[in-house]
Image (spheres, grey):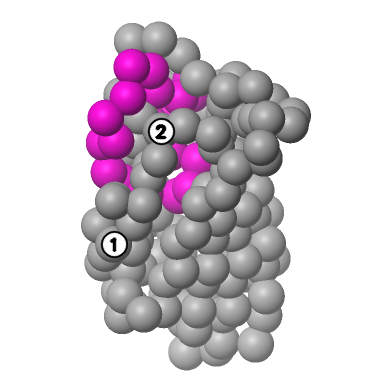
Amino acid sequence: MRVGLGYDMHAFQEGRPLVLGGVVVPSDRGLAGHSDADVLVHALMDAIIGAMRAGDIGKHFPDADPAYAGISSLELLSQVADLMAHEGWRLVDADTVLVMEAPKVAAFREEMRGNIAERLGVAVDSIGVKATTTEGLDATGRGEGAAAHAVVMLERA
């Protein structure tokens, strides 16, 4: 068995959709990034790749590669799932936390869990998604961006 930890953070940017867990969340601004900037999925992918000791998402999906410009992070997650299977690993459990002040995302939590579970080929109850604020502290608390943390447990398939 292996454990992996992932983290990601992106600044808010006007004129972009806010994509979290593969869900377009109603907001007047989205997150800046080369792909769709889905911090929740990025943190999860980093945790999985880390547990496999296969580097990080920057190694697998470099932001200088035009092939990944604007790509759905769920598509990248599917590629990580393929890599995981190819390397002989299976996701046992994943837990994630989204850190941002606004907008509130509780109404979208189950859709996020479903999107992630589907791409990873696991049951929804293997995917945890939570959200919290920093009560005005740090860049996320000041509303400058959003961050996410993820932890996963993998086992040999």
Residue at 74% over, 31% down: 137
Q: Earlier in the sequence, mark 1 or mark 2?
A: 2
What residue is disc 1 on? 110
**The label number, if any, that marks residue 82 in the structure image:** none
**Residue 95 appears anywhere in the view:** yes
The residue located at (40%, 65%) in the rendering is 81
**Hey, which quadrant is residue 37 in on the image?**
top left
Q: Which of the two residues, 51 or 142, is positioned nearer the viewer here?
A: 142
Residue 1 appears in which quarter of the rendering?
bottom right
Compared to residue 105, the image places residue 47 above or below, namely below
Q: Specify start and end residues of the magenta stretch as a single range.
A: 21-46
Residue at x 32% of width, y 24% of height: 27
Q: Does residue 16 appear in the picture of this structure?
A: no
Label 1 and label 2: CA atoms lie apart by 16 Å
Relative to 98, is 141 above or below?
above
Residue extending furthest toward the front: 135
Task: Compare residues 51 and 23 and report the one nearer the observer.
Answer: 23
Q: Which amino acid type is marked by label 1?
A: Glu
Q: Is residue 139 above or below residue 134?
A: above
1 vs 2, front mark = 2
Looking at the picture, tell me which residue is in the foreground, 84 or 149: 149
- Return the residue at label 2: 103
